[in-house]
Image: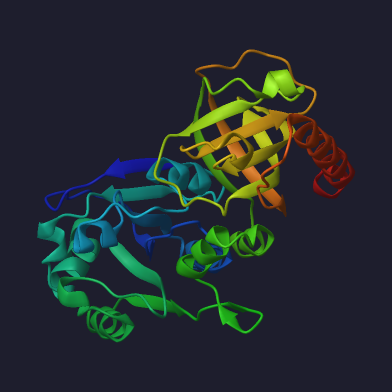
């Protein structure tokens, strides 16, 4: 997979391209249907496959906010590696791009990037004042004697699958449902930092994670997790939020990694959320807290076989 960082003056002499368009936050199973169709067109027409990404989310510029997301741009690139895409085209979403008319945007794709076929979801909107939609794409491509595929939205349990819905599930503690719709475990990345160092005194030393991106955060509580360090994976259980027993003012992400004793301060790790176990609880004593941690460990170790 090759990654090309573009601007509106970019004019590459690519072979014929089939491109998928979207924000692709999470690359959930609906997005994966788009990618599957992208690869089908590639095989049937002999085109090169590409995904067009904005480096920053469109809503961040439109609403002048830094919204939390399921994935960082770097996470998306890593995910796309597994989909066997030929190219990723990325461009910063700017006021200039936001103000493009639908014709100007599609001209950029078809003339500058040699796009011959577009794959897009049914609800896709683009360009100035969101004037562009699938009807416009179909009309434009037909007029240019090019082609497109419009993908119907997938649904699960009578609910349409969307990044917005998955974010809601993550925030409300429905992590297993979120994972089902993602087709993967929801995960966050960051650096291991020094915390309160209480865990080692309780018999459960923890890695304290400082997030490297404004990820959506799971509902406070205790989770069965998987910790990825380099190319190795370890099961763990993690506490997210304000520790009520110690009246912590600051929220933290603390993970006890099973059967692991290495010093990983300063290292970048990935934390995958598998199952929510319970709410955070205020205990009357340290002894009560330790007893509960032992119960959490037993429950997690019993669950691990389901996730191997």
Quadrant housing the N terminus: top left
Q: Seen in the image, is 150 located left or right of residue 235?
A: left
Quadrant housing the C terminus: top right
Front residue of 130/9: it is 130
| Residue at 60% in and 33% down | 254
> Where is residue 104 shown, x and y percent of the image?
13, 69
Furthest residue to the front? Answer: 284
Q: Seen in the image, is 94 located left or right of residue 229?
A: left
| Residue at 45% in and 47% down | 215
Front residue of 41/283: it is 283
Front residue of 32/228: it is 228
> Where is residue 234 shown, x and y percent of the image?
73, 31
Q: Write down the quadrant of residue 201 in the picture.
A: top right
Q: Write down the quadrant of residue 230 in the picture.
A: top right
> Would you say residue 130 is visible in this rendering?
yes
Image position of 62 with respect to 93: above or below: below
| Residue at 24% in and 62% down | 109
Q: Seen in the image, is 131 located left or right of residue 307?
A: left
> Would you say residue 40 is visible in this rendering?
no
> Where is residue 128 shown, x and y percent of the image?
15, 72
> Where is residue 174 shown, x and y percent of the image?
64, 62
Q: How many marks?
A: 0
């Amino acid at each position: 997979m090759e990654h090309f960082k573009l601007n509106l003056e970019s004019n590459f002499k690519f072979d014929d391209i089939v491109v998928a368009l979207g924000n692709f936050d999470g690359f959930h199973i609906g997005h994966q249907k788009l990618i599957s169709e992208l690869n089908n067109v590639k095989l049937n027409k002999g085109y090169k496959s590409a995904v067009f990404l904005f480096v920053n989310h469109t809503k961040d510029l439109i609403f002048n906010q830094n919204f939390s997301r399921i994935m960082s741009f770097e996470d998306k690139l890593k995910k796309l590696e597994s989909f066997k895409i030929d190219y990723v085209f990325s461009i910063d979403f700017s006021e200039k791009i936001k103000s493009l008319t639908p014709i100007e945007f599609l001209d950029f794709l078809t003339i500058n990037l040699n796009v011959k076929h577009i794959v897009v979801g049914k609800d896709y909107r683009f360009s100035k004042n969101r004037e562009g939609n699938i009807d416009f794409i179909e009309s434009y491509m037909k007029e240019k004697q090019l082609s497109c595929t419009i993908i119907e939205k997938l649904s699960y349990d009578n609910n349409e699958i969307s990044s917005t819905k998955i974010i809601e599930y993550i925030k409300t503690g429905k992590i297993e449902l979120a994972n089902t719709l993602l087709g993967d475990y929801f995960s966050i990345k960051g650096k291991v930092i020094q915390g309160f160092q209480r865990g080692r005194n309780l018999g459960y030393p923890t890695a304290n994670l400082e997030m490297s991106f404004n990820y959506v955060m799971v509902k406070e509580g205790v989770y069965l997790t998987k910790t990825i360090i380099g190319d190795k994976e370890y099961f763990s259980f993690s506490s997210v939020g304000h520790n009520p027993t110690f009246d912590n003012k600051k929220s933290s992400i603390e993970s006890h990694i099973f059967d692991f004793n290495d010093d990983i301060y300063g290292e970048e790790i990935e934390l995958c959320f598998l199952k929510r176990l319970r709410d955070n609880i205020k205990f009357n004593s340290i002894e009560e807290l330790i007893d509960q941690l032992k119960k959490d460990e037993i429950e997690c170790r019993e669950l691990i076989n389901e996730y191997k």
